[in-house]
Amino acid sequence: MLILGIETSCDETAAAVVENGRRVLSSAIASQIADHRPYGGVVPEIAGRKHLENLVPIVQSALEEAGVTPADLGAVAVTSSPGLMGALLVGTSFGKALALGWGVPLVEVNHLHAHALAINLGDRRPRLPYLALVVSGGHTTLFRVSSALNLVILGQTRDDAAGECIDKVAKFLGLSYPGGPEIDRLATGANPRAVRFTRGLAHAATLDFSFSGLKTAVVSHVLGTSRLDGPLNHQQTPAIPDGELRDLAASFLEAVVDTLVGKTLRAAREHGLSTVVVSGGVAANTRLRAKMTAEGKAAGLRVLFPGRELCTDNAAMIAGAAWHLARKKLFAGLDLRPSAKMKTGAC
Ligand code: KG4
Ligand code: ZN
């Protein structure tokens, strides 16, 4: 079965065609990074309008690249939650119109479940059940994945998502949006032990995360040692010498990575899971990939990451996750309503 997936939950407009939930025939993405960069973060109103402009060409190019026509499709799949409401409304409305016009069933997909299942695209199949850490700009969530249709949350962030924390700290340091790749680049080869930052909830008996204290700790550290003239203010970009900035980025990133690795290994231990899958935009991070792999191996775990292009937002993961629903004929009606928050009980 061929499924056209459509992803518009945040700032990427994406469409992809996937065969039988595994083989990616095309994956087209229109990035809005340049549109949001002047504002230092995603502006929901702009995101919705850009999805509207991008959807027709991006769906056309996904179909053309895959060499398929609408008549070949077994379903159209859309992200219905969680995400920015305006952005989700544009994508789900568009998907409904295509399903109605082409006479194919509609499938609704949970964005986080799709991240957790993205590892199944291609040849590597983790044995079930596995532990999935979905770590992105909007979410930091640990799932027990018992099957493609049975994902249970074991822990999640109580405040900022890890990517949100990284992007906010990067913005404070005067780096360009999105901050993740910039922090990744600066931290590589620098000293991660230059400054010891807090690891939120590290010793608490919970699988939840907290990153807001870390963000504050970096701001306090920089302002406390700042060379700024006049009153200190969080909006100002401090002048930090290059070497010091690199060590600061590495030390901050190390605190994020230690928190993610620590909670993930704890979850694997407590729930008796021997395979760990790490996905979402932050899973593209070099240090996280290296440390999770090394510490996971030392703990006897199998640690898997989807390819970087399947970690960040894409529609192949939407079409892939949709296949598990479509083969059981779990279709959505045209009265489907998107939800900014995670739908409870949804696949
Ligand atoms: O999954 P994603 O593309 O969108 C959301 O669903 O949020 O994740 C985007 C997040 C941003 O916070 C971005 O800064 C972060 O992923 N990110 C990275 C890297 N590449 C993207 N964070 C750290 N290192 C990277 N190399
Ligand atoms: Zn995402």
Image (spheres, helix red, strand yellow):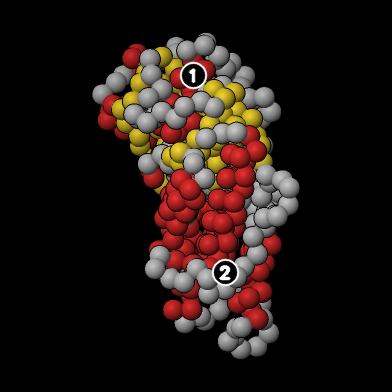
Cα separation, mark 1 vs mark 2, equals 42 Å
Q: Residue extending furthest right?
A: 205
- Residue 108 visible in this rendered orientation of the protein: no
Residue at label 2?
172
- Which residue appears at 49% of the width and 19% of the height? 324
Q: Residues within 10 Å of mark 1 (few under 14, many from 20)?
A: some
Residue at label 1?
324
Residue 319 % position (x, y): 44, 26
Residue 228 % position (x, y): 59, 85
- Which quadrant of the figure has residue 28? top left
Label 2 CB less than 8 angstroms from ligand 1: no
Taking depth in this image into account, of 297 and 222 the one nearest to the observer is: 297
- Which residue appears at 46% of the width and 72% of the height? 191
Label 1 CB less than 8 angstroms from ligand 2: no
Secondary structure under tag 1 reads helix
- Which quadrant of the figure has residue 67? top left
Secondary structure under tag 2 reads helix
- Residue 294 visible in this rendered orientation of the protein: yes
- Determine whether 254 is above or below 129 in the image: below
Image quarter in which the C terminus is found: top right
Dot 2 amino acid type = Phe
- Which residue appears at 49% of the width and 41% of the height? 300
Taking depth in this image into account, of 235 and 189 the one nearest to the observer is: 189
